[in-house]
Image (spheres, rainbow, N blue to C red):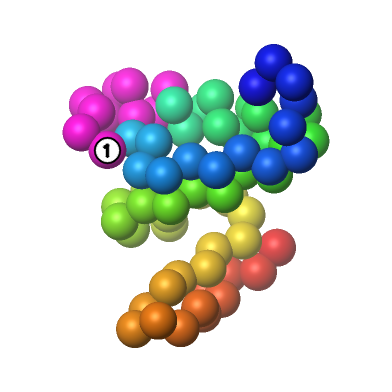
């Protein structure tokens, strides 16, 4: 983050965290995105996905499906 990356890949950034800490991490990712960095987040947590803004892509049976566009 120090070098202002164009893209940040986050693989299960809230896995095994409590609810409060998970919300803090999500807010940090939103702030990073607001500064111009694209954030690609991979998760199995569908509730978190529903509450997050932006484009949603789902990988299902090896196929990429767009469930919400930007």
Instruction: Give, as a single range, the part of the protein colored magenta.
Output: 15-24
**The magenta stretch spans residue 19:** yes
Side of 67 relative to 36 (left or right): left
Q: Is residue 32 visible?
A: yes
Secondary structure under tag 1 reads loop
Above-or-below relation of 47 to 4: below
Q: What is the x, y in percent for residue 5?
A: 73, 32
Quadrant in the picture for residue 29: top right
Q: What is the x, y in percent for residue 24?
A: 43, 22
Picture quarter with the N terminus: top right
Q: Is residue 34 visible?
A: no
Q: What is the x, y in percent for residue 35?
A: 77, 29
Picture quarter with the C terminus: bottom right
Above-or-below relation of 8 to 67: above
Quickly name the residue at label 1: 15
Of residues 21 and 15, the one nearer the viewer is: 15
**The magenta stretch spans residue 21:** yes
Q: Residue at x 54, y 63 (%)?
A: 56
The residue at the far top in this view is 2
Side of 57 relative to 16 (left or right): right
Q: What is the x, y in percent for residue 30?
A: 60, 34
């Amino acid at each position: 983050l120090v070098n202002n990356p164009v893209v940040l890949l986050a693989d299960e950034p809230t896995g095994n965290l409590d609810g409060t800490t998970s919300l803090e991490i999500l807010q940090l990712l939103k702030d990073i995105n607001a500064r111009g960095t694209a954030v690609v987040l991979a998760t199995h947590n569908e509730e978190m996905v529903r509450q997050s803004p932006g484009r949603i892509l789902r990988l299902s049976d090896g196929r990429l499906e767009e469930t919400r566009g930007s």
